[in-house]
Amino acid sequence: MVYVAVGNPFGDSTKRDGMNLFSDSIIALSLEEGNLEWYYQQVHHDVWDYDSGNQPVLFDMEVDGQDVKALAQASKNSWLYILNRETGEPVHPIIETPVSTETDVEGEVPYPTQPIPHKANGERMEPVSPVFPTDIPAQQMEANELVEQFTPIGPNQIFSPGYGGGANYAPISYGKDTGYLYINAIDQPFNSGRDPKGYFSAYDPTTGELIWRQIFEGYGQAGSVVTAGGIVFVGAGSNTAGYFYAYDAYTGEELWKFNTGAGVFASPSVYVIDGQEYVTVASGGGSRGRRGGDLILVFALPD
């Protein structure tokens, strides 16, 4: 099969009643014929631009003594979806949860539930970045209101995640030795009046538990790479500069960082030449007010 993450629906939301399949979904197609094998929709009747911007990652794991061929994908809605890639069924509970349907938009029919991932123990999973606005400047609160996620769009709202995500274009990496998923995400609530924060997290997909998290200045929109040596590399995009980080893949301890001088929005790559190991990353940025650059940086790891 071939697995595809699908973007958000387009156009006047008052003219597209219902769930709006197959937008904001993960779909599985047969490789030979392209037939639809299964689908899972992550956002029903999207009006928040919560599309699925990054590629699904495939991995195998054991859950309760059973082998599971799994798929994971993190949405701009800040939730991590872990599915059985053979059937499309959730590995852990994903509960259709009631949300607000109150709207002043004439003709709008908001969908009454949204699928919220839970852990194996039945508790709600920790989102990859906040789903309720935090650290909002006082002056921004004077004329605006904090609202819950999936509240229908209205005037003077501050909601999280904003239009940038959540998990946006950054591919997820999977550590074969750690067994963890590594996810980069953005915390910049809509209409927040503050700079973004990056949330970089490690999850145990066998339980859905958050194992560790690092929060840094700037956009968490770059993919990561994890090595067999137990290091995970990831970059940050910032309004002033961009750091390239190395973390302990097991504990999340920061081991090293380098100021690249511009935003890092690319995934790093690790390779070996003549026994010497290297890691390389592009540092560019330049849009949405972010400092631009044009570097490809290569670092040699110690002998």
Image: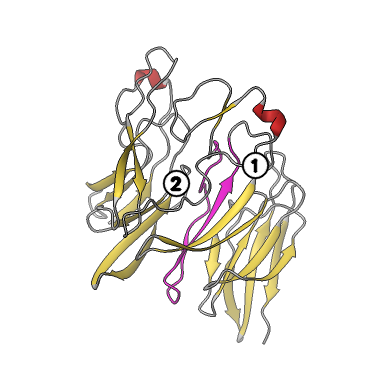
Q: Which residue is mark 1?
A: 135
- Which amino acid type is marked by label 1? Asp
Q: Nearer the viewer, mark 2 or mark 1?
A: 1
Q: Could you tell me which residue is drawn at 33 percent across and 39 percent down?
A: 97
Residue 146 versus residue 122 in the image, above or below? above
Of label 2 and label 1, which has the lower sequence position?
2
Secondary structure beneath disc 2? Answer: loop
Residue 232 versus residue 165 in the image, above or below? below
- The quadrant the N terminus occupies is bottom left
Q: Position of residue 265 (x, y in %)?
A: 62, 53
Pick the front one: 135 or 288: 135
Residue 67 versus residue 301 in the image, above or below? above
186 within the magenta span: yes
Q: Position of residue 152 (x, y in %)?
A: 44, 26
Q: CA distance from mark 2 to mark 1?
A: 22 Å
Of all residues, the one furthest to the top in this rendering is: 106
55 within the magenta span: no
Secondary structure beneath disc 1? Answer: loop
Q: Could you tell me which residue is drawn at 58 percent across and 33 percent down?
A: 190
Q: Which residue is mark 2?
A: 75
Report the disc number at residue 226: none
